[in-house]
Image (tube, rainbow, N blue to C red):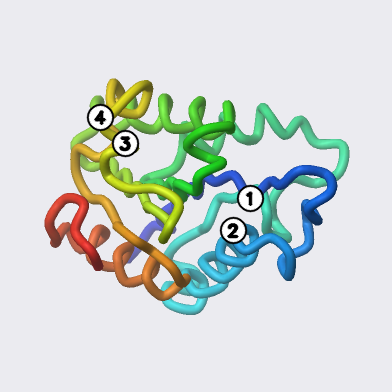
Amino acid sequence: MTAIKKLFISHSSRLDESEGINDPEKNKNLELLLDVIKDIKQEYGDAIEVLVDKDQHGFPVGHDWEKRLNEWLAECHAAVILFSKRALDNSNWVKKEATILSWRRELDIDFILIPVLLHNQTNPEDLAKDLFGTLRINKDQCIRDAETSQDVLEGLKIALGNKGDPCSKM
């Protein structure tokens, strides 16, 4: 692979103030996100640059994070959306990112958009209604019932290899 591929990860790992917002021990979705980042980096090394706001290369203090986020959405070659219950129901940022990413997919047949349905939080029917249904988020590849970072990584490897059935358990 000659060029570094850029993979954007959309997520909502936020909790209420009382729930330990940035504590991976209390926030299982944040813990999963951090594990997914680590596993992708271990699997792909420098071949894939992970664009996410929760790693050490995310947004430096004082940086215009919204501008940086928009740049990432514009320049990524593929994207993963981690659909937790909160991401689906309460995150306007995930909705914004999903809208932009689905638009990119519609314009570029080589753009890969991978929705990930988290175990006991979301299911394919959730992506078939309301905004996400209109965006046809689950049109192509969909990782279902992901419980661990390895579930996400295995689905990602299949999607990047252009194999697999839409919304199949991987």
Q: Label 4 is placed on what type of residue?
A: Arg
Residue at image point 56% right, 65% down? 32
Q: Are marks 4 and 3 in contact (CB under 8 Å)?
A: no
Q: Whole-percent x and y of residue 12?
A: 59, 44
Q: Label 2 is placed on what type of residue?
A: Asn
Q: Label 3 is placed on what type of residue?
A: Leu
Task: Say which element carries label 1.
Answer: loop
Tell me if mark 1 has few (under 14), some (14-19) or many (20+) residues whose alpha carbon lies within 10 angstroms of its own: many
Q: Whole-percent x and y of residue 57?
A: 70, 56
Q: Whole-percent x and y of residue 144?
A: 30, 57
Q: Earlier in the sequence, mark 4 or mark 2?
A: 2
Residue at image point 55% right, 50% down? 51
Number of the label disc, if any, that sits on residue 136: 4
Q: Whole-percent x and y of residue 126?
A: 34, 37
Q: Is residue 47 left or right of residue 165?
A: right
Residue 44 against residue 78 in the figure, above or below: below
Q: Label 1 is placed on what type of residue?
A: Ser
Number of the label disc, if any, that sits on residue 141: none
Task: Say which element carries label 4.
Answer: loop
- Nearer the observer, 117 or 154: 117
Q: Nearer the viewer, mark 4 or mark 3?
A: 3
Give the CA separation, mark 1 to mark 2: 5 Å
Residue at image point 51% right, 58% down? 49
Q: Nearer the viewer, mark 4 or mark 2?
A: 2
The residue under label 1 is 13
Give the CA separation, mark 3 to mark 1: 19 Å
